[in-house]
Image (spheres, rainbow, N blue to C red):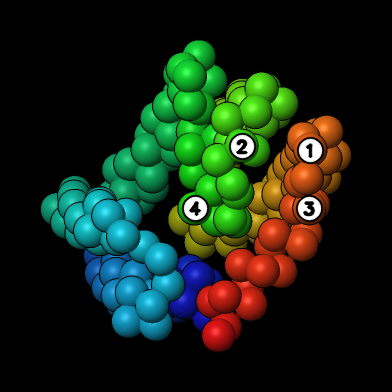
Amino acid sequence: MFDQYMPIVLFLLFNNFVGLLWAIVAMTLWAIKAQVSRYRRGLPLGRVMPVVVAYLMVRGVIGIIYDSEEVYFGIGIGVKALAAVGLLVSAGLRRNAVGYVLPYLVHLDTATVRHPVYRSATKRISVAVALVVFASVGFDTWLLQNASTNEFVAIRLGVNWGLSVLTLVAVGIYLDRRLRRIPNFPGLMRLLERRLDGLSA
């Protein structure tokens, strides 16, 4: 939680007292540091961490070169939109994005992953999450054009955090109910507890 919100705090402070350029530098360096810290703590990042770090570095460099909040935050909004498109495209494939990622978050046996109910449920979630992300992109774009830089960062943080929590809760409830139709499925909460126990062991 500290690493998640510290880049925002640093950006607001540096942007107020030093300027946009140094705010971007501080935010980028801390975000990269957070990814490295996760890796050192043994959290499962795998191939994702190098991609995230490279993205943060490129975005930071471009933001510094142009010294523009529209460019810096516009890159993030664009990447978010691409992620939503990817979710929609994956819904039409045999293995949608949610169905592919979920077994990495909680342990699911092969029979569950191959079950038609699993594929149907995760496909619907991929589409629903994509629509939520598109809505978030629209809000971020409007806010960037109608608020100051600090207002944009603070308001977007609050709105996106609330939207993320609501989405995760809705997805969890829906998945748990749908997947209980699969024989021997123990329930999503039990699987999450096992996962957390494994990480803390």
Instruction: Tell me if I can see residue 92 in this picture.
Output: yes
Tell me the tag on residue 111.
2
> In the image, 26: left or right of 164?
left
- Measure the C-alpha gap from mark 1 to mark 2: 9 Å
Q: Indicate the amino acid at tag 3.
A: Pro
- The residue closer to the viewer here, 160 or 110, is 110
Tell me whether the residue at label 4 lies in contact with that at label 1, contact meaning CB atoms closer than 8 angstroms: no
- The residue labelled by disc 3 is 186
- The residue closer to the viewer here, 102 or 186, is 186
- The residue labelled by disc 4 is 104
| Residue 79 x/y as whole percent | 37, 38
Q: Indicate the amino acid at tag 1.
A: Pro
| Residue 82 x/y as whole percent | 40, 30
- The residue labelled by disc 1 is 183
- Measure the C-alpha gap from mark 4 to mark 1: 21 Å
How many residues crowd mark 2 within 10 Å: few (<14), some (14–19), many (20+)?
A: few
| Residue 173 placement: quadrant | top right
| Residue 39 placement: quadrant | bottom left
- The residue closer to the viewer here, 6 or 70, is 6
**Front of the two marks 4 and 3:** 3
| Residue 199 x/y as whole percent | 54, 76
- Measure the C-alpha gap from mark 2 to mark 3: 13 Å
Looking at the rendered structure, the secondary structure element under dot 4 is: helix
Looking at the rendered structure, the secondary structure element under dot 3 is: loop
